[in-house]
Each structure stands twice: as C-alpha cells, then as structure tokens.
C-alpha cells in the first residue's frame, strides 16, 4: 500500500469498526420514555379529530419509531409485529392495551381457539409504557370519550409485516397481513 506524504499510515490489517448491535427491548423502552417526555416533540404532532395521525421518528440502532396521535374512541384492532421486538409509552392521555399471554404459532394457521386465562389488560396513563417480545398479539385503544392520547412506539428490526386479527370470544382469526408499503 502506498501512502502519500502528509497522510496518515493505514494498516491493511486495521480492524473494521464494530458492527452496530441491535437495540434491546430495554433500549427501545428507554428511547420511547425519553421521546414521550419531550414536550416540544409531543406538541409538534398534528392531531385529527377523525383518525389517528403519525410521524416517523429516528429510533435507536436502526429501529423504526413512530409518534402517534389517537383521537377519542380509536384503536388498532388485534395485531402483532411479526419478528420485531418493541416498546411503547403514552405521552399524554391514557391508552389501554389488551394482550394475549400466550405464544401463538407464527405461520400456517387462520383460526385459533384461545384457552381461558390468556387475556391481559393494562391501563397506560401518561408516562407509562411497556416493552414486548416477538409475536406479541395485542390491541391498543384510546377509550376516552373526549380526549386525544399521544404515544411513542419503537420496533426492531423495522417492521417486516403486521398481522391483523379479528376476535370473537375465544376465537382469534388471521384476517390480513400488511407490509411496510401498506402503511408508510
């Protein structure tokens, strides 16, 4: 290797920079906590009385992150985030999360009968949130009759797909698989 005068010598065996590691659930939760506490960021989200609004954020370590506004009475419906881990935090208002405390098969099914005792409910007022693992099935709701809620969400790896479900009593049905081009 030739080195010109005045330039630093570089060895052919110099180690490459270490690869960026994937953010952990704890790091995603820390990110959404800090973002939810940023009053200027939260105030910048345009709110629509008719539907959810969202703005994409730069998440840590290549994660996908969103600031989401929830009008009164809105929700996501039952869904999962496929192979992504994630975290979310309520910044203002209150959200309710219904989730299933059961690992579901990842592919190859359309209808499942759920066993008793798998339902979980969390109330998440401003400043409260949670992290979750792969294949976490849940729905998030703003049950307030008159107040918007705002939350921050982060996922890693960036969402490869979202599976949407319908639920009737103890029966969960896969209804649709969305890809990033469907929501971005």
Image: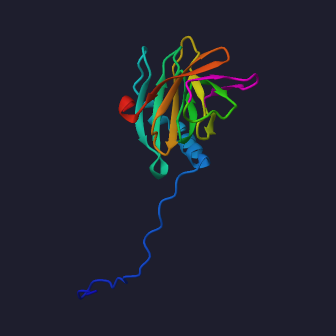
24, above or below 135, in the image: below
Quadrant in which the N terminus is drawn: bottom left
Magenta segment includes 118? yes
6, above or below 66, in the image: below
Magenta segment includes 165? no
Q: Position of residue 139 (x, y in %)?
A: 58, 24
- Which residue is outermost to the right? 117
Residue at horizontal 55 percent and vertical 34 percent from the top = 107
- Which residue is outermost to the left? 4
Quick one: 73 or 121, which is closer to the camera?
121
Quadrant in which the C terminus is drawn: top left
In this image, 82 relative to 171: left or right?
left
Quick one: 109 or 55, which is closer to the camera?
109
Q: Position of residue 47 (x, y in %)?
A: 42, 22
Residue 8 occupies quadrant: bottom left
Residue at horizontal 57 percent and vertical 24 percent from the top = 140
In this image, 12 relative to 169: left or right?
left
Residue at horizontal 45 percent and vertical 50 percent from the top = 62
Q: Which residues are magenta?
A: 109-126
- Which residue is outermost to the top? 145
Q: Position of residue 144 (x, y in %)?
A: 58, 15
Q: How many marks?
A: 0
């Amino acid at each position: 290797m030739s080195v010109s005068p005045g330039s630093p010598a570089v060895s052919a065996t110099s180690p490459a920079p270490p690869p960026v590691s994937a953010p952990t659930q704890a790091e995603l939760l820390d990110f959404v906590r800090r973002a939810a506490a940023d009053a200027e960021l939260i105030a910048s989200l345009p709110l629509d009385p008719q539907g959810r609004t969202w703005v994409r954020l730069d998440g840590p370590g290549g994660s996908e992150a969103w600031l989401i506004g929830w009008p009164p009475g809105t929700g996501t419906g039952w869904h999962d985030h496929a192979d992504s881990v994630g975290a979310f935090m309520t910044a203002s208002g209150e959200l309710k999360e219904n989730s299933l405390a059961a690992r579901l098969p990842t592919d190859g099914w359309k209808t499942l009968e759920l066993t008793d005792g798998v339902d979980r409910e969390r109330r998440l007022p401003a400043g409260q949130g949670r992290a979750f693992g792969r294949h976490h099935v849940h729905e998030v709701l703003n049950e307030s009759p008159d107040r918007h809620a705002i939350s921050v969400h982060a996922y890693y790896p960036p969402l490869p797909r979202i599976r949407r479900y319908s639920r009737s009593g103890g029966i969960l049905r896969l209804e649709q698989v969305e890809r990033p081009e469907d929501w971005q």
